[in-house]
C-alpha cells in the first residue's frame, strides 16, 4: 500500500510439459500410494485448475516449467493516503498467446528497514478457444478464434480421460484413454466420450494450446 514503485517480471510456462506429466500421473495412479505430479510431489491429485496454487507457493520448484526469457518492467505507483487500497490496470509486454508467470516485487521501508514484498500470479493469453456442447449421443467441440469468434478448421484436438477401474481388488488402478481428432471445416469435432471418464480436451493451433 505504501510502495512508490513496483518491478514486474513475466516468463512463459511450459504447458506441454505440464500436460504430459499430468497424463503420466493418471496413467500410473494407484489407490495404495500417493501419485507424483512432476515437481509438485506433496500436492495431489494433479489438477490443471490448481496451477495458480502450484506456481505461487514457495514450496514447489517451478524453474523447470519456465521457458524463454524473463521480461521485466517497472511501474510507478501513487499510494493513497491513510494506507487505503488502490487498483490500477497494468499492461503486459507479451502479446503472444500462452500462460505466463507474472511476479511483482516492491520495496518499502518498515521500521527503518527496507523490506521487499513479492507476489505471483499466472496470466493466460488465448488466441483460440474450445466450446463444448453435449447431446444424447455425442459431445461436440468447436474451436474458435478468441478475438473474432470465427470457426477454426483443421485444428488438432487431443482428448485424455481417466477413471478408477471397477472391482474391489486392492490396490485399484486408473484406466486411461487418449485419442486425437481434427476439426472439420466448421471448426467442429464430434466424438462419443465414455461418460464414466474425466476428460481433458486440448486444442493446438500454431503451437499454442486451448484447454477444456
Image (tube, rainbow, N blue to C red):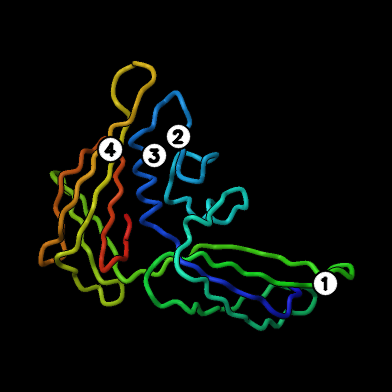
Q: Residue 157: percent from the left, percent from the top?
A: 22, 56
* Discs 1/2, front: 2
Q: Quadrant of residue 204?
A: bottom left
Q: Label 3 vs label 2: CA separation?
A: 6 Å
* Image-based side of 56 in relation to 174, left or right: right
Q: Residue 211: percent from the left, percent from the top?
A: 33, 57
Residue under label 4, please give it: 197
Residue under label 1, please give it: 109
Q: Residues within 10 Å of mark 4 (few under 14, many from 20)?
A: some
Residue nearest the viewer, comparing 207 with 84: 207
Residue under label 3, please give it: 25
Q: Residues within 10 Å of mark 1 (few under 14, many from 20)?
A: few
Q: Residue furthest right?
A: 112
Q: Label 2 vs label 4: CA separation?
A: 18 Å
Q: Residue at x 46, y 38 (%)?
A: 36
Q: Residue at x 46, y 45 (%)?
A: 38
| Dot placed on the residue nearer the N-terminal end, 4 or 3 | 3
* Discs 1/4, front: 1
Labels 2 & 4 near each other (Cβ < 8 A): no
Q: Quadrant of residue 160?
A: top left
Vertical comparison of 101 with 29: above or below: below
* Image-based side of 105 in relation to 147, left or right: right
Residue under label 2, please give it: 35
Q: Quadrant of residue 205?
A: bottom left
Q: Secondary structure at mark 3?
A: helix
Q: Label 4 vs label 3: CA separation?
A: 15 Å
For the image shown, how many numbered marks are present on the structure?
4
| Dot placed on the residue nearer the N-terminal end, 1 or 4 | 1
Amino acid at each position: 500500500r505504501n510502495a512508490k514503485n513496483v518491478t514486474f517480471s513475466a516468463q512463459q510456462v511450459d504447458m506441454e510439459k505440464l500436460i504430459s506429466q499430468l497424463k503420466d500421473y493418471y496413467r500410473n495412479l494407484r489407490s495404495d500410494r500417493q501419485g507424483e505430479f512432476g515437481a509438485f510431489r506433496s500436492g495431489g491429485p494433479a489438477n490443471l485448475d490448481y496451477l495458480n496454487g502450484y506456481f505461487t507457493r514457495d514450496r514447489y520448484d517451478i524453474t523447470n516449467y519456465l521457458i524463454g526469457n524473463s521480461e521485466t518492467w517497472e511501474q510507478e505507483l501513487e499510494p493513497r493516503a491513510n494506507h487505503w487500497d488502490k487498483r490500477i490496470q497494468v499492461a503486459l509486454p507479451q502479446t503472444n498467446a500462452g500462460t505466463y508467470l507474472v511476479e511483482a516485487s516492491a520495496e518499502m521501508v518498515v521500521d527503518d528497514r527496507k523490506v521487499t514484498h513479492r507476489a505471483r500470479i499466472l496470466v493466460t493469453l488465448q488466441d483460440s478457444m474450445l466450446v463444448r456442447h453435449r447431446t444424447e449421443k455425442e459431445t461436440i467441440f468447436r474451436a474458435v478464434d478468441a478475438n473474432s469468434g470465427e470457426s477454426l478448421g483443421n485444428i488438432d484436438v487431443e482428448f485424455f480421460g481417466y477413471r478408477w477401474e471397477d472391482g474391489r481388488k486392492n490396490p485399484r488402478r486408473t484406466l486411461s484413454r487418449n485419442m486425437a481428432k481434427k476439426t472439420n471445416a466448421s471448426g467442429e469435432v464430434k466424438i462419443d466420450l465414455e461418460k464414466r471418464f474425466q476428460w481433458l480436451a486440448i486444442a493446438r493451433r500454431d503451437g499454442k494450446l486451448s484447454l477444456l
